[in-house]
Image (tube, rainbow, N blue to C red):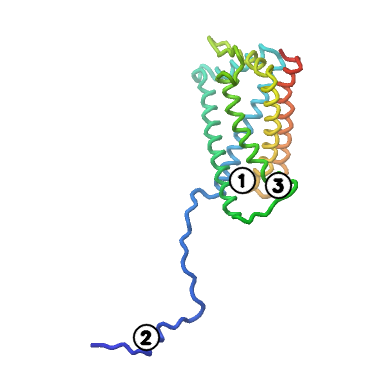
Amino acid sequence: MTTTNPHEATQARIQVGPPGRPQRQRRRRGVPSWALKSAMAITGAIWAAFVAIHLFGNLKVFQGAAAFNGYAAWLREVFYPFFPKEMVLWALRVVLVIALVIHVAAAAIVWSRGRRARGGHRVKLKGMKSWSAWLMPLTGVALLVFVVVHVLDLTLGVAPVAPEGFAHPEHGATHAYGNLIASFQRPWSAWFYVLVMVLLSLHIAKGFATMAADLGAMGRRWRATLSAIGGLLAVAVLLGNAAIPLAVQMGWLS
């Protein structure tokens, strides 16, 4: 039978050097924040491009009913007969819906993670920094509500959001001009649209200002270029789109 020397056992238990830190299990956080911010930047750029193209089409309302209705009909038949009628339009809608879902989901996750990381003792921002911190989430929620209202109003024609007598497309003919005028003849609809255009312009300008950093481009020229593009697009969207309901309310469009 073997025996253990007590002196050797005591030496074996002596700690040499500082105690080691216990191994901590890192909690999996799912999608990395950098990937979420990149997704927000890309999907935001997709929607910004759509807003710019949509602005160009909206301005045709000042050319009269024939031009505006013709543009609406063209959207339904673009690339026909190479593609079936409305195929391109529906493909665009699918892309926009997917981009919107990704954009909103990524923004919600990033915002939630930021609040958890700051904990209970948050630095209270004042002045422009405080406004800037709340600008994107507030305008984002407002724009999400507007997208739903706008689709119910001028695309689906669902009452009571849509005006009475909303005319759906039939036999290749569209009534987009009449539906738009009827909608903006209601003061609440016109001023709601103007307010949303202000919020959209702020969202675009702020989004382009942070897009370079979200995509990993930290150079001053990239940031300055994207900020300038966002500012110009924001001004164009505000002046161009807001002019339509105001012109209807003034009686210049009827």
Give whichever of discs 3 and 1 has the lower sequence position.
3
* Residue drawn where x is 51% and y is 77% of the image: 18
In which image quadrant can residue 144 be found? Answer: top right
Tell me the distance, in whole angstroms, between the alpha carbons under discs 3 and 1.
24 Å
Residue 119 x, y percent position in the rendering: 59, 55
Tell me the distance, in whole angstroms, between the alpha carbons under discs 1 and 2.
59 Å
Q: Is residue 7 left or right of residue 136?
A: left
Which of label 1 and label 2 is nearer to you?
A: 2
Q: Nearer the viewer, residue 175 or 95?
A: 175
User: How many marks are shown on the rendered structure?
Assistant: 3
Residue 215 x, y percent position in the rendering: 61, 46
* Residue drawn where x is 60% and y is 34% of the image: 46
Q: Secondary structure at mark 2?
A: helix
Q: Secondary structure at mark 1?
A: loop
Answer above or below: position of 175 versus 229. Answer: above
What is the three-letter code of the residue carrying label 3? Ser
Q: Which residue is mark 3?
A: 130
What is the three-letter code of the residue carrying label 2? Ala
Tell me the distance, in whole angstroms, between the alpha carbons under discs 2 and 3.
63 Å
Q: Is residue 166 left or right of residue 14?
A: right
Answer above or below: position of 48 versus 244. Answer: below
Q: Which residue is mark 2?
A: 9
Q: Are marks 3 and 1 in contact (CB under 8 Å)?
A: no
Number of other residues with Cα within 10 Å of mark 3, as a class: few under 14, some 14 to 19, many 20 or more = few
Which residue ends up furthest to the top in the rendered image? 171
Q: Are marks 1 and 2 in contact (CB under 8 Å)?
A: no
Residue 183 x, y percent position in the rendering: 65, 18
Q: Secondary structure at mark 3?
A: helix
Which of label 2 and label 3 is nearer to you?
A: 3
Q: Which residue is mark 1?
A: 215
What is the three-letter code of the residue carrying label 1? Leu
Q: Quadrant of the C terminus?
A: top right
